[in-house]
Image: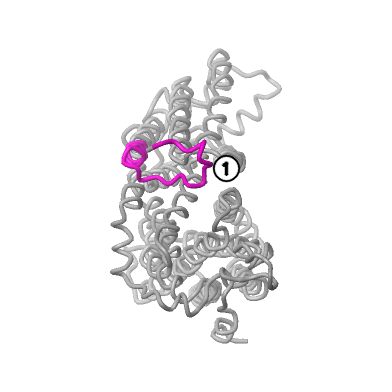
Amino acid sequence: MSVEDEIKSTVQTVGAAKGQPGEAPLSPAAAVGMVSIVASIISTLLIRIGARTSFVILSFWIGKESESAALVVLVIECFYISELLLAPLVGVLSDRKGRKPFMLYAPVVGAFASLVLAGTSFLFPNPQLNASNFSLELVAILILVMVGRLLEGSAAALNAPSNLGYLTDTTVGDERFRVRVLTAYEVVTISGIALAIPFGGLVWSMIGRAGFFVAVAVYALCYIVIAIWMKESLNRTNAAGQHGSIREYREILTNKRIFTFVPAWLAINAMIGAWLTLSLIILAYPTSTCRVALEKVTDNIKPAVQAFSQNYCAITHGEVNADARFPNQLLHGGFLPGEASNIVGLYGVVFILGMGIWTVFVPKMRRTSVMVLALGGLFVSCGALLLINGLGNNPLTITETARNEMWVLLPIVLISVVVMSGFTPAALTHMAAISETLPGKRGAVMGLYSVLLGLGQLVGVFVGGLFVDLQGFNGLMIYSLILGVISLGSVIYMRSHNHDIDDHLKPGQQIAH
């Protein structure tokens, strides 16, 4: 069955589904069934795994013989361009055409993107993206890779707004269930990106460039999951009455509840993007000062420390000694790449677990209260990390007293990250609540997720990198605190001007505005 046939046969009324004669209408969730909702969430997991696997293989393929990091970053990061441009339009159109059509097209486009990249990798097995070697071959590689990455961004843009619109459709009237479903969506999004990094590395080590076909297989599985197990949530006739357009989306952005919330959500996405990307780089900066630890260790571990010093701490030509550049910053360099990955991975795990814990409390609390508490967690975590960063110059030369202080501060960091993680489920459910006030525009409103996520990643990493260049790890923390203040100002303004929605609370729980 073709994609078009599948679309025509599956667009049906579900949100208005009814039970047997004499019975009350089914809830939206009951109308589509839990299998359909789970399939929708799993499709996001598979889309993210497919895209990130392709990204990892692409990075290894074009990066292994390319001296120009700027060109490599240019072709890889153009992924976000198509996602930012298309996500708003897809959100609007999914309100008119239905959710499933766009979710079906997403893996098709993603698979085609991987095939383009695979074909390019076999046509040009040894790419050298170096501006000094300008040639028609270089131009061809750049164009083909950029086409592949733009298509992968389009796949993400097709899935995210329509998927979030679908999950919002199917959780109308059940705040507790909505919080759990949207949190699950965010968890699988982060997990898909994180899991695919080692998975893509494994695939590359086993089959090299042929790994692009593994990404194609993941996309194919995604299509099967959506086509077989997911039911549509909108009626074609009802949806067709909505005339989606860019003008309509601009009108949505001027909605007071959305307009005042955008700074808060964008700032948090920028902060998360900066932490996940820049922390990995900062921790693993090379340093030569760890050699002095050889004078302080016992004979039984001296060989291991010496091997570490020789294999990692030796500064090669062109590298900058992290300790010399920013002395007295414990978290600026000196960690093995594997150690840095584990530290950042631990942050991700704690953040995900925290979101799971918050699903119990968000339905019972005022959403802006959750956001304020979460931002308080951000401020505490930044303060604790600044104190830890000032405990020494290098992880191998830290004193015993400083080490003990660090073990006191680390639990504070972990607890504050759990508190901080509450912002995401509160923000997503707040966006879903706003969409309820704009009939027929749930997909358009939820499409802001992709826009702000992508924009936040780009802005967060770029501006955060400037702060890191100026002040090292302390610069990242200062940048995070600034973003936290911006977000807090947005939330307080939204709360004080009655722009938040708390109709999920019982009358006795609601706070008068």
Task: Tell me where residue 271 appears, x and y as whole percent.
Answer: 41, 42
Task: Tell me where residue 390 appears, x and y as whole percent.
Answer: 44, 21
Task: Reply above or below: 154 against 68.
Answer: below
499 within the magenta span:
yes
Regarding mark 1 in the picture, which secondary structure is present there?
helix
**Mark 1: which amino acid?**
Met
Comparing 257 with 315, the one in front is 257
Comparing 471 with 139, the one in front is 471
Q: Which residue is mark 1?
A: 355
Q: Residue furthest front?
A: 22
Comparing 276 with 199, the one in front is 276
Give the residue at x 70% y 72%: 20
Task: Tell me where residue 353 appears, x and y as whole percent.
Answer: 61, 41
Packing grade of label 1 (10 A; few <14, some 14-19, many >=20) is: many
Give the residue at x 58% y 53%: 174
Q: Residue furthest top?
A: 401
Q: Quadrant of residue 57?
A: bottom right
Task: Tell me where residue 186 appears, x and y as whole percent.
Answer: 54, 52
Give the residue at x 46% y 25%: 389
Residue 474 visible to an observer of this rendering: yes
Comparing 435 with 106, the one in front is 435
- Quadrant placement of the N terminus: bottom right
* Magenta part of the chain: 488-512
- Number of labels in the image equals 1
- Quadrant placement of the C terminus: top left
Q: Main secondary structure of the magenta part?
A: loop
Residue 213 visible to an observer of this rendering: no
Task: Reply above or below: 423 against 298.
Answer: below
